[in-house]
Amino acid sequence: MGTLLQFVGDWGHALAAVLFAALGIFVLRRRDETPEQRLLAAALLLTACWSLYVSFGGVEKPLSGMGENIRNAAWLLLLFVMLRRGPAARIGSMVAVGSLYAAVAGLILLQTFADLIWRQLPVMSDMHRAFVHVALVLRMMTAIGSLILVHHLYIGWPTRERGRVALLLGALAAMWTYDLNLYAIGYFAMHRANELYALRGAMMALLAPVIGAGLRTDGGGRLQLSRTLTLQSISLAAVLLYGVALTAAAVLIELVAGPYARVVEIGCVFLMAVSALVLLPSRRLRAFWKVQVAKHFFQHRYDYRTEWMRFGDTLGRAGGDRGDNALPLGERVAKAVADITDSPAAILMLRSEDGALAFETEWNWLEELPDGAVIPAPLALLIEQSGWIIDVDRPPSGAGEVVAPHWMSEDRRAWAMVPLIHFGRLIGAILLARPPIDRRLDWEDFDMLRAAGRQAASYLSEAQGQQALDDAQRFDEFNRRFAFIIHDVKNLVSQLSLLARNAERHADNPDFRADMVLTLKESVGKMNDMLARLSQHNKGRAEEPRAMALDEVARQVARTRSRQHPVRVTGEAPLVLADPARVEQILIHLLQNAIDASASDRPVELRLSTDGTVARLDMIDQGRGMTAEFIRRELFKPFSSSKAGGFGIGAFEARALAQAMGGRIDVESKPGVGSRFTLSLPLAQGEEFRGKAA
């Protein structure tokens, strides 16, 4: 071994010893000690001791092999304890796995015995060479068995918690993969293995930060096994095939590469180790492996019990410490359906008042949808009647078949849309993103997604019903409180009316009497007007629409508020078909909101115009403005107000009154710029309405 290589080997192992010792001390200083934590600290410290011994003495020292055996035994004991502390109900599955742990432990004992023997024999003897080869074979078998156990523990770990142990298990897999390559090359070409022995210290030093990054979370957890027998068998076969291929490659390199064999072997070892670290954690590779195994070894694509338990678990958890549990119901529904097909993102669309499906929320869908990204009402009705799942990539094969909207077909992320149908009524849909391994939907996907869509629809329908019940209860409370207020006001009106009559009849001072009568009559008039409006509102039905001049009502309302705030009225509008009292109530609500949101020096503009068959009144302010989220979720929701002390029923009542007259209210707003509320009412067309403006 050259001087430079010796230097790299010694200092590489020394650096690894320092890093692993630091990690072990860090774990020991944790307050929340568990058996896994104590074993992890022991394994780290024993690895540090082994690296330090190799750094001082070299691999040819007798205790270096025994130190490696102790290191391997410590890590395997940690893996066994992590596995053993799984659910008690799964204890039966531990028999086969425990036998494998026992077999690997036996291999470690045998190779320790072989190491002790061959070091006592003459170097050039046949017995010495035989025991050296036996020891190398035992170390290769130990590395293979350890890799199988790491793989078994990883696939048995709950999917949602694999991130907690992925780095630790990945580092151990890299360590034993390097050992396997090292001893395989040493078995066929001992003189080529010195460089790999020396570079192992640098490799271990690189693995220490990886393990340290994984120590940010606790390594303990509970196991959730499913379909493991076939997966483990296939994985074992893959590992054995890997060992055979590696052995054949080493022999071929020796025969073909000649003087460059050492360089080629070292390059292959590092390439395979790096490839394992990069590819094995890949979600795309895992998805491909899962699809292939399910396709060729199972009758069904899905493990229905596992998928349904995970689906219900995601939907049912409304709060907790982990991020998935803290999601709102809409995002949980989207995630639960997406997890079934391994889709990385999903969008929830709910039924709007016009019958179309509009965006409600998203899960992991980072990019914004294009403008007009809705499911039109006719298509939503067809989906409701048929219950079909839209396969975005599948062209229609027959007349009347559901076709994906244009914006969905152009978005390469869109893969499938699952309808949410509850008792024959479409309440929404979930748009799924393409999974890591893109594939065509088949009958099993359709059946699974259709069942999941119905279950998700029941959750959403229940939540909507509960929200409606809460709103009704709040309305009852609101009406109850105002019933008392109306009762008190009626009493006050009666008292003031009596006082007014007595003042007219008994007051001696004419000036006092005039002021008293004027004041009392104005108060009585205002209170009676309030009672009349409340009584009309409580009727719950619109008056018969008739032709009316919208511009006159707008100017009248503007005059009543002009002393409070600057208000401008511009433009003209023809007669509209509406109820003047309700139009006045709408304008009072909207104008008061605009005044409240505007600064005292910023006027509010009422702009009249005509657009086709409707008259428009735009109420424009330069106030605080509103976000799109607030407009979509809160603005027209009863009892939701952005004003301190507000009841939050003004905008709600204004829209309800407009819809009752066949009109509508649209909103455009931007924070810091202002808002535009547009009231649209149908025109009063026909000769019978001419000259009959109210």
Image (cartoon, grey):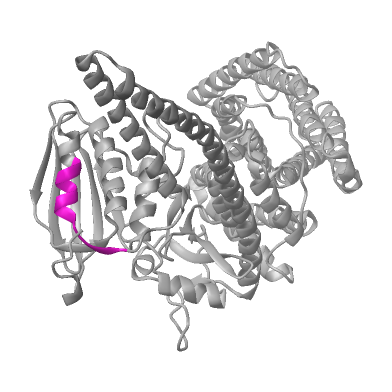
State left or right for residue 132 relative to residue 24: right
Main SS class of the magenta portion in the image: helix
Q: Quadrant of residue 393?
A: bottom left
Q: Is residue 413 above or below residue 443?
A: above
Magenta stretch bounds = 545-557
> Is residue 553 within the magenta segment?
yes
Q: Quadrant of residue 392?
A: bottom left
Which residue is depicted at the point 54% across and 77% down? 385
The residue lying toward the viewer, choosing from 117 and 67, is: 67
Residue found at the far bottom of this picture: 399
Number of marks present in the image shown: 0
Report if residue 282 is visible in the image.
no
The residue lying toward the viewer, choosing from 174 and 449, is: 449
Looking at the picture, how far across and down is residue 574, in whole percent? Answer: 13, 62
State left or right for residue 624 relative to residue 650: left
Report if residue 267 is visible in the image.
yes
> Is residue 109 within the magenta segment?
no
Q: Quadrant of residue 163?
A: top right
Q: Quarter of the image containing the N terminus? A: top right
Looking at the picture, how far across and down is residue 689, in whole percent? Answer: 19, 70
Q: Quarter of the image containing the C terminus? A: bottom left
Which residue is depicted at the point 51% across and 52% down? 344
The residue lying toward the viewer, choosing from 493 and 298, is: 493
Which residue is depicted at the point 61% across and 14% down? 22
Looking at the picture, how far across and down is residue 598, in whole percent? Answer: 21, 31
